[in-house]
Amino acid sequence: MVRRIERSVQELYRDDPERADALAFGRRGALKGAALAAMGGAVGAAIPFGGSMPQGTLPALFSRPAAAQSGGPALLDLPGKGPLILQGERPLNAETPETLLDEPVTSARNMFIRNNGGVPDAAADPRAWKLVVEGEVNQRLELTVGELEARFPVITRQLQLECGGNGRAFYQPQARGNQWGNGAISNGEWTGVRLRDVLNAAGLKSSAVATGHYGADPHLSNEPGRPAIARGMRIAKAMEEDTLLAFRLNGAAIPQLHGAPLRLVTPGWPGSLSQKWLTRIWVRDKPHDGPGMGGTSYRVPVRPIVPGSSNNGRDFADLESMPVRAILSSHAHGARLPAGTRALDLRGAAWAGDLTVRAVHVSVDFGASWTAMQVADPANRHAWQRWTGRVALPSDGYYEVWYRATDSEGRMQPHAPPNWNPQGYGGNPISRAAILVG
Amino acid sequence: MRLAVLGLALLLASPVLIRPAAAQPASQADAARAMAERAEEESVLAEGEGRSETFGYCTACHNTALIRRSRFSRAQWDGLMDWMTERHGMNPLEGEFRDLIVDYLARHYGPSQSRARNPFLN
């Protein structure tokens, strides 16, 4: 029933946005009188904090990315995978709904999927899979997965792995690429060897400044020899202690879709630096220039540009450490709770690339007041942090849970997605989940 | 802010539902391939002049999900054609054929907040 009225508001907005806005919000901004009643009618409930709703703000019920609407989007149906939100079949991309990220350690089942090309066939003998390390090194290395595991210290870490385009759907005008909400994030427990141990074994020349990564996935065109993607990072990140050549996820073999039998895990930086089906690391004497580097790919403006304008990205900078973000995993956007519910026990996770999260705050009155949540320490550096807390509700009705994290340098998630760019990187606005009580 | 939410509201007004078929191949790679190879009908794209050409030319590498989710201006669609050629090896689109396809895309997959006026752009 709520759905039907919601449609009609959308139709009104489509046909005559000025009138719809005036009807829903009144002319002076804050919701009141007939306008408040109209919006209450639209969401099928009273809006207890309507008075503090900012001008022109559509209830989160209508304004969340389509992919986050429960019941709306197509869901993934693949062996070993949960009901992720399908972004596309070719290439195969799927987002994890925030409520499936309620596990402190993300299961392989619930890990989001990002592919730039096709999914290669599983290796007949995973232990014999070969990695080549070459370029600005004293000694070219060719190592099998078996040799990597036997020769170097094996370590296990919980590590954030997040698509560089996570949050892209929040941008307006629309930015190019998969329309991810907040769910292109995972915190799996990865086992492998440190990339730096392998690079040290090869011996870095003084000319080594960056890496370039290659995998076995075919380009979408199936053109032989054309990499689907081949990105690289500055050498300092490659030499960090949490940057791994991983061969196990959560104690088991890596699933084929997630890069078996060997992948990079470069935590806190765009997921495209965590090359799947890894075959080769090319140590470079200049920043890497493979497909996925340069232009507007994985790059953000240094000097802000006009939203919607075209730009060749020449003056942009590579996106490196990912920005601070929180997810809410205890309550689905659009959840309906029994009448009389007067408090919400909330849970979620938050992370901030190479930094940590200092605070998570929640508001149920459209940002007029904020309640601090308890934020746990990360299991190790580069793991996400879980948060919990309680907020009170004064009555039945329509609420929005606004949730926002602050990083260890004091930067908060902004109210609107910042620094618009053509391919939509760095979109980390405060998130809003609609809850109906009664 | 207001324009942003308006745009998203309009996106919601066009739900797209494609359920994957219930095939259960043994391996993830096989299952992913089966999904990728599942044929699409031209009619998943909006009806209009240029649809057949667009469907034929644009589904060689990826399926139409990438097109259907997009809301771009004509200039953005036009730029994307060059990006696909330069970065991904698409055969260059030129002349009338290019106009036909770009016009089709801009007409049917244009910006969702068409009433908004950007003071810096128009």
Image (cartoon, coloured by chain):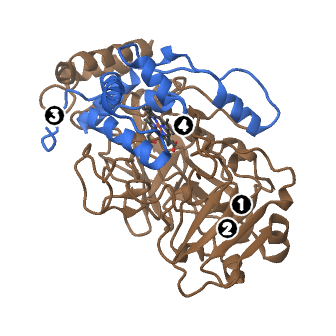
Chain colours: A brown, B blue
Disc on the earlier residue, 2 or 4 = 2
The quadrant in which residue A90 appears is top right
Inter-mark Cα distance, 2 to 3: 48 Å
Q: Are marks 2 and 1 in contact (CB under 8 Å)?
A: yes
- Could you tell me residue A395's position as x and y percent? 40, 30
Residue in the foreground of this view, choosing between B100 and A148: B100
Q: CA distance from mark 4 to mark 3?
A: 37 Å
In this view of the protein, can residue A128 be seen by the observer?
yes
Q: CA distance from mark 1 to mark 4?
A: 28 Å
Of the residues shown, which amino acid type is indicated by label 2?
A: Leu
On the image, the x and y values in percent for residue B80 come to: 37, 40
In the image, is residue B85 above or below residue A143?
A: above
Residue highlighted by disc 3: B117
Q: How far is disc 3 from disc 1 in space, using C-alphas? A: 48 Å
> Do residues under tags 2 and 3 come within 8 Å of each other at their CB atoms?
no
Which residue is denoted by mark 2 in the rendering?
Answer: A244
The residue that disc 1 covers is A190
Subunit under mark 2: A
Element type at marker 2? strand
**Mark 2, other Cα within 10 Å: few <14 / some 14–19 / many ≥20:** many
Name the residue carrying label 4.
A331
Name the kind of residue labelled 4 in the image: His
Q: Chain of mark 3?
A: B
The quarter of the rendered structure image containing the N terminus of chain A is: top left
Q: Spatial distance from mark 2 to mark 4, Cα to Cα?
A: 33 Å
Dot placed on the residue nearer the N-terminal end, 2 or 1: 1
